[in-house]
Image: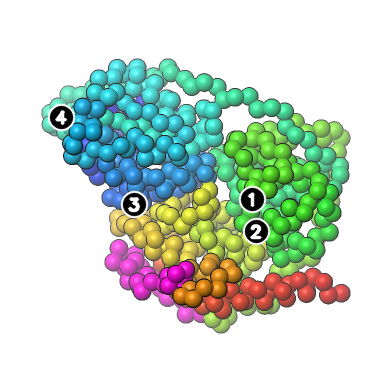
Amino acid sequence: MQAALTLLEALCLQGLKQLVLCPGSRSGPLATAAGVLTSQAKLQVVTAIDERSAAFLALGMATAHGRAVAVVTTSGTAVANLLPAAVEADRSCQPLLLLTADRPARLKNCGANQTVNQESFLLAACRWFCSGAADGVHTQANDALNALAVQAWQQAQGAGSGPPGPVQLNLPFDEPLHPSLEQQHQLVSGACPPTACVEPPPEIGPAPHLNAGRPGVVIAGPWRGLSPALAAYQQALHRWLNLSGWPVLADPLAAVAADCPNRIEHWELQLDGLNLSQDVQVLRLGPMPASRRLEAWLQRHQGPQVLITEGESRPLDPLQQASQWSGGMAAWIAQQPLGDLASKPSVGTDDLSPWIEAQLPLSGAVNEPALAYWLPQLLPERLPVMLAASSPVRDWLTWGGPASGSHRCFSFRGASGIDGTLSLAMGLAANLGPLALVTGDLALLHDSNGWLHASSAAAAPPLLVVLIDNGGGGIFQQLPIDTPGFERLFAMPQQVDPLALAAAHGVPGRQVACLDDLQETLAWGLSQQRPVLLRLCSDRGHDAALRLQLRAAAQNERTEP
């Protein structure tokens, strides 16, 4: 416990404020030490019984503030359950600190209980991995434990050789694992101010240039920086747009500010009609938006492309057409030869929103394009929204309209999985406050253990879950799949009653019968200030056909004189 307390105190000195604790005996010293630091108001501890859900909860919490959250597990399969969240943290470049308890080396590979090769489970996804002393962390001096904490924290936060991401500390603990109450009182932390440091990150070369005085377009993909850097990113983007006059095609996840100039609404529906020449300059920010039409347009493009990432040096251009630079938007614009350029007028484009509203009125049966159009308008302005990484995020890109820009949207599309959807939203809401999650039925059911985080009324985050229940995998209905047995092989509808499942966890819910009732039900859900489930049922076959019809009609709307 002394070693555990020293290590956790050193992490707190680095900036650790929150820890998600999973049950276990081998991790007992870490649990007891975390309890001591909680009593001293140095650390907030959240408990979770499912390691997989716990890691996603911590990832959501870390993403909200841009600061690593620790997850503590016992040994064995508990560690394996951390992999899905570690993969997402790796690809979405968000900090996560995984503290896994283990047995000393003498008990490994000899048939001892609950010993596995957990050192290798997470290696492919982690920024950095380190094991404590093989004989047990109690054999390490305080300076060594402090150095371990400093290295782990800085690597997780992106102060090492790569962007922020997951880090694993595998910590062997020898017995006795559980000191008596008297022994706990006698223990005095030996932590001292950390003195160790990591190597400075490699220098980034000069930024590639674009000419703000010539025509161009900005494609703003999902934001993958840390939250504290967002304001500088937005200011730099605004400055470039004002000076260049370029239009911006923004993904819902791009985190551009609501007053972003030159923003093209519903750009995905009118991409071919924007009069962008084949040699126009392209400034791409972050990874590619979820648009096949945009990818096709870029593949035909012949002009210069520059791709700016927020510290991510791994290749992010599947088309292999852009010059990538990882110094971030704020640093990039500081290196551009802007000279005496004056602000240019905003780009004028046709607004399709009135036409879309006429096609998708707030009445009648629920359909997914209408929800994507109306939810941004009906939810309170500036309420954060998390979109499940399947149909919802694509629908908001296409149908969301001007109101979608008034919400900070999150979606964990680093690996584009539906893993941990509910737990991630719980973590975001725990640190951001009221938040809405828009999800499909399979994504919600896949992470049903996320409802466990709502079981404590005192700690339950204010999360409004808007469930689009279309009886299976609606995204597959939109793909050209013509296979016998489609329902069983792809859609996989389930028979679970989501309202009953939520109620079993103490979560209130309501069924929304039609779009006419949506506004009133949203107001009720938001007033609860705790996890709430709203279920809206739609027909995925009808919605897939409706999307195609609307796209064709929108094209006609653009081309008719």
**Going by the picture, which residue comes out furthest to the bottom?**
364
Which residue position holds label 2? 291
Q: Position of residue 402 (x, y in %)?
A: 67, 62
Q: Quadrant of residue 36?
A: top left
Whole-number angstrom distance, CA of label 4 to CA of label 3: 32 Å
Q: Secondary structure at mark 4?
A: loop
**Tag 1 and tag 4, C-beta contact below 8 Å:** no
- Colour logic: rainbow
* Count of numbered tags: 4
Q: Is residue 69 visible?
A: yes
Region in magenta: 487-514
The amino acid sitting under disc 3 is Ala
**Going by the picture, which residue comes out furthest to the front?**
484
Camera-near label (2 vs 3) is: 2
In primary-sequence order, the first of circles 1 and 4 is 4
Which residue position holds label 3? 459
Camera-near label (1 vs 4) is: 1
Q: Is residue 499 magenta?
A: yes
Camera-near label (3 vs 1) is: 1
